[in-house]
Amino acid sequence: MTAAPRSLVLDLFGDYLRYTGGEVLLGHMTELLGAFDVAPATVRMTLSRLRREGWFTTRRIGRETVYRLSDEMLALLEQGRRRIFAVPAQEWDRTWTMLIYGLAEADRSGRDELRRTLAWHGFGQMATSTWLAPGDRRAEIEAATAELLGGELAQRTDVFTCASRDHEHDRALAARCWDLPALAAEYREFIEANAELAAHPERLEGAAALVARTQLVSTYRHFPFKDPRLPVELCPSDWPGQRAWELFTRTHAALGPAARAHVESVVQTEVPEPPAVT
């Protein structure tokens, strides 16, 4: 299934256009999205809407409009790239981070935003207002929630590090906070759906390589929202998350030269290979 046009725009900036100055001509974006069967009128409408939402600023070069991604969106892309490509956790010191929040039931939007933030940073819900994540993530989650609710959230949350009584309790907590069987099934489905592409990525060139690589990212990138990056010892046996990550990163890299070459042919400038995620 092809991703929505607005998602495709972010994917193209995430893998290519942010490394060529962070901006693109409307005509070039129209040609790139044409490979995904997105009509020119839809491209114009999508970019215009994203500009109104603050994703882009615009300027003119002659009769062409140039769309430049905002600094905030560039930072979001970098955060997402680090999360998507980061090596899965291996070792663990048996430390948990626990966050407890106190928000009124009437503050539904604030509560939902906090929950999305917690899930993105690998926290699982242990109780109604109590969330848990493996490892010491105090600094990470405090920084992530600092601006929520106009900065008031810091007064309504408590963050601790803690440890359970033993390894079996740790595994029970993991099973309680996350639906690991459902996540494993999704990982296996991803592996099966992309097995042929992973086996023969060299068969694709030009626009076909760009489309396949972008669709690969589109289908994989939801996993960081669901996978808490549990250390291996907390995962069920035969956990497919590591295999899925290896297939994704290997295939993404293999398709890179052909996909970048196609983007270069459209935007008429070199598209450098992104730096490795450490």
Image (tube, helix red, strand yellow):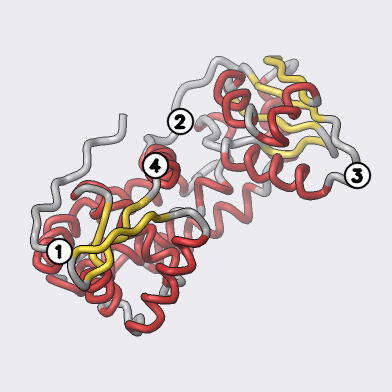
Q: What count of labels does the image hold? A: 4
Mark seen at residue 89 = 2
Foreground tag (1 vs 3) = 1
Mark seen at residue 105 = 3
Above or below for 260 versus 143: below
Q: CA distance from mark 1 to mark 3?
A: 50 Å
Report crowding for label 1: few under 14, some 14 to 19, many 20 or more residues within 10 A (C-alpha). some
Q: What's the amino acid at mark 3? A: Glu
Left/right placement of residue 189 relative to residue 226 reads left
Looking at the image, can residue 65 be seen?
yes
Q: What's the amino acid at mark 2? A: Ala
Q: CA distance from mark 2 to mark 3?
A: 35 Å
Mark seen at residue 71 = 4
Left/right placement of residue 194 relative to residue 90 reads left
Asked whether disc 3 touches disc 4, contact meaning CB atoms under 8 Å apart, the reply is: no
Q: CA distance from mark 4 to mark 2?
A: 29 Å
